[in-house]
Image: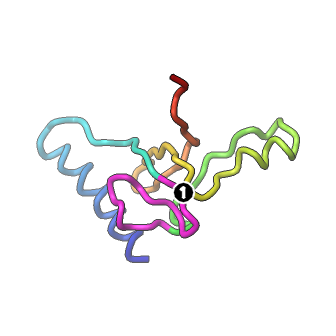
């Protein structure tokens, strides 16, 4: 619960600092890692957001069950996270590009 509060507070402060500075930009997308305990954002590596403290976009609904099971987030998956106000939304997995 403490992690959720600190992440929300940080998101609110980032947003407000951007407005105060009249800079007009506050980070709304970032990278994170799915762990057995939950989501760890790169910007808050010591805080774990437990399941229920973030939401995940749902994709691949037209695929068969076997294909969908392969796309489920697993431990150590790297993800892109967008912020919808103070709610982190995992929008998909990422992987290293082929060289």
Is 97 part of what is drawn in magenta? no
> On the rendered structure, is 47 left or right of 20?
right
Query: Which image quadrant for residue 30?
Result: top left
Q: In this view, does 40 lie to the left or right of 9?
A: right
Q: In this view, does 38 lie to the left or right of 16?
A: right
Residue, disc 1 = 34
Q: Residue furthest bottom?
A: 1
Q: Is residue 48 above or below residue 96?
A: below
Q: In this view, does 67 lie to the left or right of 27?
A: right
Q: Which of 69 and 82 is in front in this view?
A: 69
Callout 1: SS: strand
Badge 1 local density, few (<14 within 10 Å), some, or many (20+)? many
Position of the N terminus, as image quadrant, is bottom left
Where residue 55 sits: x, y (%)?
A: 57, 55
What residue is rendered at 40% in x and 41% in y? Answer: 29
Looking at the picture, how far across and down is residue 13, in whole percent?
A: 23, 57
Q: Residue at x 38, y 76 (%)?
A: 2
* Residue pictured at 19% horizontal, 44% vertical: 19
Return the residue found at the far left: 21
Q: Residue at x 40, y 51 (%)?
A: 85
Total tally of numbered discs in the picture: 1
Residue 12, compared with residue 26, is above or below; it is: below
Please name whichever residue, 99 or 70, is drawn nearer the observer in this view of the structure.
99
Q: Give the range drawn in magenta.
A: 33-49
Residue 41 lies in magenta, yes or no?
yes
The chief SS type of the magenta part is loop
């Amino acid at each position: 619960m403490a992690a959720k509060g600190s992440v929300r507070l940080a998101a609110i402060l980032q947003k407000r600092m951007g407005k105060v500075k009249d800079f007009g930009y506050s980070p709304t997308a970032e990278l994170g890692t799915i762990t057995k305990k939950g989501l760890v954002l790169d910007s808050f590596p010591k805080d774990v957001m437990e399941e229920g403290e973030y939401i995940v976009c749902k994709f691949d609904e037209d695929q068969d069950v076997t294909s969908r099971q392969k796309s489920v987030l697993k431990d150590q998956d790297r993800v892109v996270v967008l912020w919808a106000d103070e709610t982190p939304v995992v929008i998909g997995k990422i992987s290293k590009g082929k060289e």
